Image (cartoon, rainbow, N blue to C red):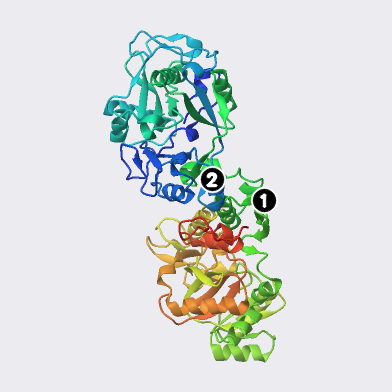
Amino acid sequence: MATGTARTDRERVLGPRRERVGPGGDPVAPGTTEAKRSTTGDGVVLDCGWGRLVFGQTFGGDQAAVAQVLRSEAAGARDICIYLRDPHVLVSRLPDELFIDPSLTYRLPLGGDRPARTDGVVTAATRETTEGTSGRDGAEIPGLRIRPLRDEADADAVNRIYARNGMVTAPVEVLVANARTDRFLHLVAEDVTGEVVGTITGVDHVAVFADPENGASLWCLTVDFNTAPPGTGQALLTDLAARLTARGRAFVDLSVLAENTGAIRLYERLGFYRTATLCVKRKNPINERLFLPAMPEGYDQLNPYAKIVADEAMRRGIRVEVTDPTWGELRLTSGGRTIHTRESLSELTSAVAMSRCDDKRVTRRILTEAGLSVPRGRTATGDAGDDAFLAEAGRVVVKPARGEQGNGITVGVRTPEALTAAVELARRFCPEVLIEELREGEDLRVIVIDHEVVAAAVRRPAQVTGDGVHDIAELIERQSRRRAAATGGESRIPLDDMTREVIAEAGHELHDVLPEGTVLAVRRTANLHTGGTIHDVTGELHPEIAEACVAASRALDIPVTGLDLLVPSPDRPEHVFIEANERPGLANHEPQPTAERFVDLLFPGTRAPQRLWTPAGAASSPA
């Protein structure tokens, strides 16, 4: 229907509100040029090119049929269902797919039933001359001509205006074909130069479905604000109303956003009055501004791992409160259910499960008892036992028993002296230190949510590529800036002793210039916080690894976890578990649906339905 943004001149509030203009109708194939009976019942749907207009009153109360039509909306289109009985009931049954449009419906009586005060609207005779057209307050607009849309050139001009105002465009052939039927009144405003500067679409309900109420509606009222003379929008509305009056129609309806107070004041001044009609639309990208809530306070301060959860919750209509942006803490509410989260950690993870992941020694013990594979290891004692284990293993990894983000970990320890130093480093982060045999392989992270594998990715240590110009230190700084920019500051390559040691083991120093194309790893661990990169391998994951990860999540009794494994290749069955994380970064695994599955876990009632909704049978017990 019509809509507009508030501007100083009355006509300028009639068009620019793009969200309200351009929804359309017809359940048949896109591009159909006539209204047809729906195959799901007696419902009538009209294809307007930019979407379909679904006449809810023609479905005889069959809400399941209406739902089926709306769910068949074409990509990039904007459908709208209007005049549906009890639209709130339909939306309550498909809240993840449909919403009540936040607009008001206004009606202008035509003919003898209209109010005496018209301010010039619907009183001017229909004109197709160049003498001038009635505009603001009935005044003539010199050189402005209102006429029907005639051909492809007109349709192209209309689409240009639609696009300029952020509206959905329509196939040219559909606009032209529709304009040649009595169901549509496609009008354009042409200025003195012959340029099309505005457009409006009327739908004659009597011609479409023999409307017993003898009504009509108007849609797509908009103008080119760079070229249209003041009053063009009102002139289009005036002419359309005159043509509908000549057809004997009783009223014409339009819809306008409730927040558009300027347009509402104008419509009321022109004789429109408000009705109780509501409209239903699909939750698609075009309509996001209409159904997504305003960004909560503190949203902009969230890190990517909390923001991805907030975005998915808001997409479903779940209320999001940012309780601590620095900590990534959210309060999510849907209906009577409220859950607190910190990134991917929620109240559904028990303190016991969290503690099992927090201490790597406990994680190892539980997984071993479950029959799962872990590297050989021991708790550091600082005596000959540590040296004996090193001699047996050859090379070891030393890590704090508790900690995250790779802090205090030393990989590839070979000598007793290096082992002593590595244990001392680890104890800066945790008094208890774990020594494990070093197992070769790729660093694999598997995300398990609700005991199902959702994503898998190989993580690789930070590396730089020589260009023959910059030295290694400069290459690291540049790569670190790129990783920080890509992760919202979460990933950087530290220029610390470990980085220098890795570079030295490769036979280089920081001031060396690598030949062009030479790749040099500068960290041992693939931790993302120290510049590591992640590569999706979900589709390659071997079934035995997936089964083992599910078994690990059940053994730990944790609903969301990121399991770290070493594997020769993700598509081979061999593996060992390294650790389990109670708060894995879901944002690291796009395009896999990690956030979607996490919110499914938190609010099962907001899951996307697996089949069409159908009303409960007559024998069902009342709620």
Q: Quadrant of residue 195?
A: top left
Residue 99's mark? 2
Left or right? Give the position of 325 relative to 93. Answer: right
On-image quarter of the C terminus = bottom right
Residue 524, visible in the rendered structure:
no
Residue 507 on image: x %, y %: 47, 71
Q: Nearer the viewer, mark 2 or mark 1?
A: 2
Q: Which mark is residue 321?
A: 1
Residue 11, placed above or below residue 543: above
Q: What's the residue type where badge 1 is placed? A: Glu
* Left or right: where 535 falls relative to 146: right
- 120 w.r.t. 576: above or below: above
Q: Image height check: is 148 above or below 500?
A: above
Label 2 is placed on what type of residue? Phe
Could you tell me how far apart the alpha carbons at marks 2 and 1 are, in whole angstroms?
Answer: 21 Å
Q: Position of residue 368 (x, y in %)?
A: 59, 86
Disc 2 on helix, strand or loop? strand
Callouts 2 and 1 close, C-beta under 8 Å: no
Q: Eyeballing the image, is 55 above or below 156?
A: below
Residue at the spot 34% in from the left edge and 10% down from the top edge: 130
Q: Nearer the viewer, residue 125 or 294?
A: 125
Q: Earlier in the sequence, mark 2 or mark 1?
A: 2
- Report helix, strand or loop for mark 1: strand
Residue 350 placement (x, y as % from top left): 68, 71
Q: Nearer the viewer, residue 229 or 494?
A: 229
Q: Position of residue 371 (x, y in %)?
A: 55, 87
Kindly give the residue lying farthest to the right in the view shown. 431
